[in-house]
Structures are given as structure tokens and as C-alpha cells.
Amino acid sequence: MPHTHDTLLLKRRDFLIRLPVCAALCQRALSEPTAEQAISFFVVGDTHYCARADDPSAMMETSLQTNQGLLRWLNDLPGKTFPANLGGGVMPLPQGVIHAGDIIDNGDKGPGKYPMVATECAAFVKDWGLNGGEGLLRWPVREVHGNHDGPQGDTPMVREIIARNQRREGLLHVSENGLHYSWDWGGVHFVALGIVAGDAPQVTRKRRYAPMASLPFLEKDLKTHAGQSGKPVVLIHHVDVHRYSTTVDDQKAKHQEWDYGDAQAFYQVIAPYRIAACICGHTHVRRTMRWNGTADVNTTQGVPFLNTDNAAHFHSTSQAFLHVTIAGAEMIVREFATSDAWKTGSWTPQMWRYNI
């Protein structure tokens, strides 16, 4: 049954993890996992922070309340027990939260909406912080940009991500343009690729969304930071790739959100590596599947693909996010959802296990 924050039992462990944020972060730092230990993290997407159209300097109340409700759950769930039907056990403190893009709502609507964008961007930064504890969120956040943040990579929200990457702790590699980045949590390597993985040199036509040289960055990063190590790799981008894995003519290709040539080149780049998961948002529907480089969503072979639902969109009261655990050669994925804009929440009954 769904439960409210008011009815949660405050057990001794719960009390300890509700101590000041600095204590929680110290505990997390002291217990940073090795390659043999489990890591865990949350996956959210499509928060769509939205300012008021009649007063661009103020946030839409529904948007702000929904996002802050999401953050309360992300803060409160670690230390609680998973339901027995989802394996039981206590959720550990997470390494962080991955945001799969569409952070704000109006970054795709041109400079005339930039006053709204400034308000939305400021609200996100204030609520989410960066390295854990600067805002409402207790954990570090790793975000990529989506089409609503800046489809051509030239908006205030995208520039804010670039600025945040200069202050983001624990990064291994940042792209020349400052937008894409990678890091390790325990023995797992993560790469943040923005809206899509693209700019394959063989694709010369104009793309609908600018990849901002994410594919060359990924290719270099994997050679340098994964190489022949066999370490699991998690890739994050906003747009889902399955729909764009079939060759089409040039006229249709220019309207694709992810150019099929870039999608095919992306698969070729990642195929030699041990890809634990690709993470995306964008569709506002949760889907878990595998990707073998084609549009076949029913294949049992290929890269595990985690397409997360919208987590705080102001247009709906139904939201969800994922929790992921990677331990050795296994990845376990669970989903936590709400039907009332995060006033209450509960685990959905499915649990997905992947051999990586």
C-alpha cells in the first residue's frame, strides 16, 4: 500500500541517516565501494521545471511542489526496506542521482522564453544542488541536457551544465566543450552524453538535435577509461535510440530526433565494451529492454536499456523513477511511483535483473 511521509516509522537506522547532510556524505565517502562491492543510484528524468507564463520571474506552483516532493522521496528512501516481493533488504545510501534530461521546460522555445528559462534553471540549481547537500537533495546529481533544455546546445540551461561541470566533484574526463563528462562509482564507469550520442564523421546531413560532439568524446573516453579492463560501463543520454535504429532516406532522417547514422555509429563504438546499461528518458513512459543495434524491442540479446518515466512533470500527477543496484555481474532495477504528484509513493511490483 502507498504510504505517506507522515506515516513512515522512524527506526534507529532511519534516525541515523536523517542526521545533518554532512554526516551522511561522510558516511558515504568512507564506504565508497570497490569493484567487488555493490553500488546503487537513482535514475530520474523529465522534471520539466516550469515558470509561470504570466510572471516569468516566478515558478509555477504545481511544478515546484511536484519536484520538491520527488526530492523528499529521493532523500527518504535510503535506509528503508525493499518490499519482500522485490527482494527485501535495506536500501543502502546511494552514490548519487542520475538525471536523464529535460530538466526544465522552456529551453527549446527560443530567446523570447529565456526569462522563464532563467527562473527554471535557478529553481533546479537551488533544489538539486550539485555535489550533495547544497540544495534540498542529499546526494550528488549527474545530469544531461534534453531537448527541452536546449536542442541545439546553446541555451542558458546548457551553459549552466557546462559551468556545473567545472565544480562537479569526482569527474575523470570532461569534453573540450565542457558539456559531456565521465566518472567512476566504485568499479563502474559512467559517461554522460547529453541529448544524443552523435556527430559521427560519416554523417554529413544536418541533424534535428545537435549532438555537440558527444560520440567522439565517448569513443576517446572508453578507450582511455574502460579499455581492456572489462569494467561495467553505464551510458546516459536523453533520447531513446530504438526508434532511430533503422536506415531511412535523407528527407526523413533530417526530422529524426536521433539521426539513424549516429545511432548505428554509436552501437559500433560501444559494442566492444561491457555495457551494463544505457539510460534515457524523453518518452514519459518506463520501458526496460535490450538493444542490439536494431529497432527490435523484443530481443533478448544486447545492451540493457533503462528508459525511465517522467519524474516530476507538471502536466501529470503520475510520476516514477528507478533505483539501480550493480553488484558484480548483476544489475537489479526497481521502480518507485506516485499517482498523486509525490504526496504518496510506492514500489511498483516489477523487478528487473540483468546479467552484465
Image: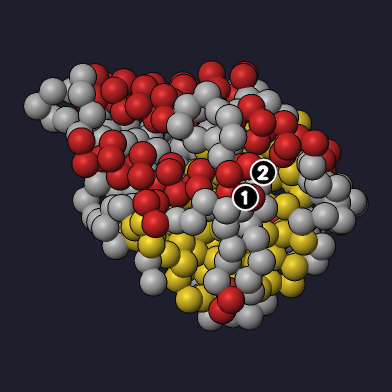
Q: Nearer the viewer, residue 284 or 10?
A: 10
Q: Residue at x 20, y 24 (%)?
A: 58
Left/right placement of residue 102 relative to residue 51 reads right
Q: Is residue 49 visible?
A: yes
Earlier-in-chain disc, 1 versus 2: 1
Amino acid type for the residue under numbered disc 1: Arg
Classify 141 as above or below 327: above
Residue annotated with mark 2: 95
- Of all residues shown, which one is farthest toward the right? 228
Residue annotated with mark 1: 12
Q: Is residue 179 visible?
A: no
Left/right placement of residue 156 relative to residue 241 reads left
Classify 199 as above or below 228: above
Image quarter for residue 221?
A: top right
Relative image position of residue 180 (x, y in whole percent): 60, 33
Q: Residue at x 53, y 19 (%)?
A: 163
Amino acid type for the residue under numbered disc 2: Gln
Q: Element under label 2?
A: loop
**Distance in Å between CA atoms under marks 1 and 2:** 22 Å
Q: Residue at x 37, y 66 (%)?
A: 2
Mark identifier at residue 316? none
Classify 30 as above or below 326: above
Image quarter for residue 71?
A: top left
Q: Nearer the viewer, residue 271 or 45?
A: 45
